[in-house]
Image (tube, rainbow, N blue to C red):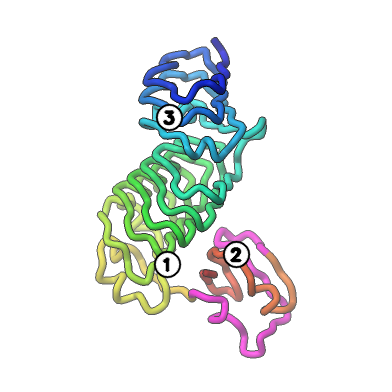
Amino acid sequence: MTSVTIPNSVVSIGSEAFRYCSGLTSVTIPNSVVSIGSGAFSGCDGLTAVHISNLESWCNIVFANGSGNPLGCAKHLYLNGEEITELTIPGNIKSIGDYQFYNCVGMTSIIMHDSIKTIGEGAFSDCDGLTEINLPDSLTIIGEDAFSSCNNLRTISLPKNITSIGKDAFAWNYDIESVYSFAETPVACEENIFTSSTYNDATLYIPHGTEVAYSQTSPWNKFKIKSISTSVENVVPDNQTSDKVCIYTIDGKLFKKGFDFIKEAKGLPSNVYIINGKKVYVK
């Protein structure tokens, strides 16, 4: 058996249903499936593709564990025949479940709308294609191992309303260079949300005026700490214009440019930018 198309009549795939089907190379999951059991696709070492036709339906599947998600072996998710590399979570999704995109290495970026409240356990662990994570201000809870072992991760931006971060949420990411936390009050969490090398090597950027709070709160005080501006207004020149305006994303890519500072800087999507040589968080 080399491929399986699950019929639309199926709502649940049981535990170990396709275990050790080593010849299986692709599986098509219909919109009707709402749960997949433990180890359903464990040992399917030949699996290279998971096909779906509706991203919202995929986001609503409950996975018993990582080995229940066929992405654990396949690593590549296809939506209507096109591989998902730039993932945009549907706007009406409020929670990203446990192991939802576990080991989806073909994914290089994630866009989450301000509807997302929680990210579950292991939801994006082992997603090696990710280099940057920008989380929406609506997010309050990040589960255990949510972004662990994303081997090329360099930059993390934590939103202002975060209240809980689970253990190992960003662990075993050894190349993180920058962590941005926009919470005015630092989140109380365990030291093991990051690997020790992250505390040693990365810089934590925090809102101006919160330096004392972060320097007195573990584990945030283990970082090298720098404060940043939190609005475009803080970097507007006195005359409100400049000869040339270049706005870069935090990873150094040119986002837009022009000659009118107000025109170019206002209305930017919520994110971290480099404007006039300063790191700026646009709310």
* Residue contact between numbered discs 1 and 3, judged by CB atoms under 8 Å: no
* Position above or below: 20 against 135: above
Q: Position of residue 147 (x, y in %)?
A: 41, 46
Q: Which mark is residue 269?
A: 2
Q: Residue at x 43, y 29 (%)?
A: 35
Determine crowd level at label 1: few under 14, some 14-19, many 20+ residues with C-alpha closer than 10 A.
many
* Residue contact between numbered discs 2 and 1, judged by CB atoms under 8 Å: no
Q: Is residue 197 magenta?
A: no
Q: Residue at x 50, y 47 (%)?
A: 93
Q: Earlier in the sequence, mark 2 or mark 1?
A: 1
CA–CA distance in space, label 2 to label 1: 16 Å
Q: Earlier in the sequence, mark 2 or mark 3?
A: 3
Q: For this view, does 203 lie left or right of residue 274?
A: left
Q: For this view, does 173 lie left or right of residue 230?
A: left
Q: Secondary structure at mark 1?
A: loop
Q: Earlier in the sequence, mark 1 or mark 3?
A: 3
Q: Secondary structure at mark 3?
A: strand
Q: Quadrant of residue 243?
A: bottom right
Q: Position of residue 49 (x, y in %)?
A: 57, 26
Q: Which mark is residue 35?
A: 3
Q: Is residue 109 visible?
A: no
Mark nearest the camera among 2 and 3 is 3
Q: Is residue 253 magenta?
A: yes
Residue interval drawn in magenta = 230-255
Determine crowd level at label 3: few under 14, some 14-19, many 20+ residues with C-alpha closer than 10 A.
some
CA–CA distance in space, label 1 to label 3: 35 Å
Amino acid at circle 2: Pro
